[in-house]
Amino acid sequence: MVHPQIYIFDLDGTLVDAYPAIVRSFNGCMSAFGYPVQKEGRIRSAVGWGDRNLLKPFVPPGRLAKVLACYRQRHARDLKGGVSWMPHARGLLGELKRKGAKLAVASNRPTRFTRIIIGCLGAERLFDRVLCADRLRFGKPHPLILREILKGFGAAPKDAVYIGDMAIDVQTGRRAGVTTAAIATGSSTLKELKREKPDYLFSDLGQFKKGFCLKP
């Protein structure tokens, strides 16, 4: 079993459940602009590629900028009452931190909203590095985000594990040469995750914790 020094986590669907806030913001904007509201499952499956790509399939290109501005304004408010830890997430992070592991977040979410989530959950001191796709030339599944985090730690791919809930997370980890664990609690189905053949596949973070305990 791998015993990494660095644990890099995706955010939505992996560590946090922000789907209620996303659905509220999304459908609020759809209604405001006269577009059909969508069911939670349809919205949930589109999460993970950044907010612009979340809206793009549902909005005409000429209106995307205005709807995106609406979404971002609403979402900054909705997040403050619509986000919670995924099961086992807070306990896992606390244990890893106590045992000396380095913790990071790699997310396609804009930095502004990632910081709101981390602040609402009181998790600022848990993470040694938080990096989002809006600070980079490429977002996931491009491996740049993981490479930059490793560079910041002065570490090699072999020193880390990347944990995410989506097929694109598995693709990102593979392209960066990082051991990747898929957690079936988010936007990708179990079937979709299996198709990507991650190094490890767990039903939730509780199972992950058992499989990736640090050495005493």
Image: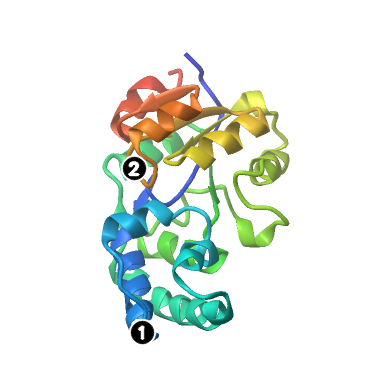
User: What amino acid is at disc 1?
Assistant: Gly
Residue 156 vertical placement versus 147 (above, below) = above
Counting from the top left corner in percent of width and height, residue 215 is at 45, 18
Helix, strand or loop at mark 1: loop
Residue at x-position 40% and y-position 40%:
93
Residue 26 vertical placement versus 180 (above, below) = below
User: What amino acid is at disc 2?
Assistant: Ala
For residue 116, what is the image quadrant? bottom left
Helix, strand or loop at mark 2: helix
Asked whether the residues under the numbered discs 1 and 2 touch, taking CB atoms below 8 Å apart as contact, a structural biologist would say no
Q: Nearer the viewer, residue 194 or 145?
A: 194
Residue at x-position 26% and y-position 43%:
87
Which label's residue is closer to the chain start, 1 or 2? Answer: 1
Residue at x-position 37% and y-position 78%:
35
Left or right of 119: which side holds 185? left
Mark carried by residue 89: 2
Counting from the top left corner in percent of width and height, residue 149 is at 65, 44
- Is residue 18 in view? no
Q: Where is mark 1, residue-wise?
A: 34
